[in-house]
Image (cartoon, rainbow, N blue to C red):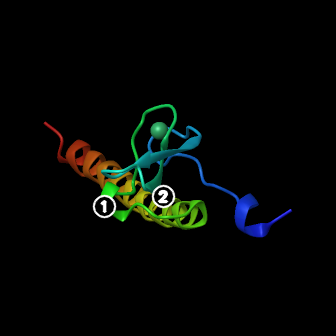
Amino acid sequence: MSLFNKGPLRNCPFCGGEPKLIKCGNHKEYLVYICSRCHESPVRLDEASVCEFGARRRWNQRTEEAEYIIKAYNRLQASTTIFTSSEGK
Ligand SMILES: [Zn+2]
C-alpha cells in the first residue's frame, strides 16, 4: 500500500460528490480531478498535473480553498438576511 496512491480525497465542495480523474490537454497528457456528479472542479484546467499524485494534491488543496470561500459566502448571506429582516417595514 502506498501513501501516495491511497491518500484521502476530499469530496466535491459544491455538491459533496465523489471526484473522478480525467485526462485533459491537447494530447490528453494532463490529469485533473473533476466531480463525478456535478462535473465541476475547483481546479482550473491549466492547473492540471502530469501525475495522479499531483492531481490529488491539487484537488485537495483547491477543494479546501473552495470550502472556505463557500463557508464565508454562506456566513455573509446569513448576516445579510439578519440585517435585512432587522430593518423592518
Ligand atoms: Zn460536485
Q: Quadrant of residue 9?
A: bottom right
Neighbourhood count class around disc 1 (C-alpha, 10 Å): few under 14, some 14–19, many 20 upward: few
| Corner quadrant of residue 81 | top left
Q: CA distance from mark 1 to mark 2?
A: 16 Å
In-front residue for pair 50/32: 50
- The residue lying at 55 percent from left, 42 percent from top is 20
Viewer-proximal residue, 88 or 14?
A: 14
> Is 6 displayed left or right of 87 in the figure?
right
Amino acid at circle 1:
Asp
**Residue type beneath disc 2:** Thr
Residue at the spot x=47%, y=55% of the render? 31
Query: Would residue 9 appear left or right of 40 to someone viewing this image?
Result: right
* Image position, residue 25 (x, y; %): 34, 52
- Provide the secondary structure element on which disc 1 rests: helix
Residue 1: % across, % down:
86, 62
Spot the residue most to the left. 89
- Mark 1 residue CB less than 8 A from any atom of ligand 1: no
Disc 2: which residue: 63
Residue at numbered disc 1: 46
Element carrying mark 2 = helix
